[in-house]
Image (spheres, rainbow, N blue to C red):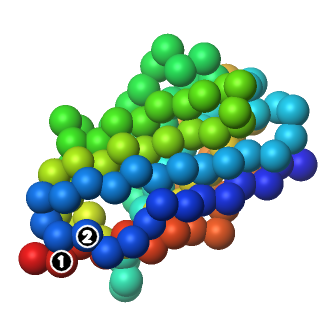
Amino acid sequence: QVQLVESGGGLVQAGGSLRLSCAASGRTFSTMTMGWFRQAAGKEREFVAAISWSGGSTYYANSVKGRFTISRDNAKNTVYLQMNSLKPEDTAVYYCAADRGLLVRTRWEEYDYWGQGTQVTVSS
């Protein structure tokens, strides 16, 4: 069993930055693909970014490419999402997720464990 706890959300002005963290419990973190997803009010959950177990491969949604960076520290059982040049349309609840599979996937249905989410609000 893996438990995920996100932190770092908040209110920021457009153009600002935030860094989300996701701390994982359990000894299997270093073998798992990690992803970030978000869900805006009234919308479906969508993929934001994912990183392979080694950190060697990363994937991004087109809407955040060049602005967001996903990274991980396996020694600390933590995955990060650095968000720069934030836009009002980035406003959402952001979720950290873990996938026991080896492939880096972008569909939320394929992830096995989820955090409780952290709110990010970007004002214009």
Mark drawn on residue 12: 2
Residue under the point 17% across and 70% down: 13
Amino acid type indicated by mark 2? Val
Direction bottom: furthest residue: 42
Residue under the point 89% across and 49% down: 1
Percent position of residue 68, x then y: 29, 42
Q: Earlier in the sequence, mark 1 or mark 2?
A: 2
> Alpha carbon of mark 1 to alpha carbon of mark 2: how far?
6 Å
Mark drawn on residue 123: 1
CB contact under 8 Å: marks 1 and 2: yes
Side of 3 relative to 53 (left or right): right
Percent position of residue 60, x then y: 34, 38
Q: Which image quarter: residue 33?
A: top right
Q: Eyeballing the image, is 93 above or below 99?
A: below
Amino acid type indicated by mark 1? Ser
Residue sitting nearer the eye, 68 or 99: 68
Say which element carries label 1: strand
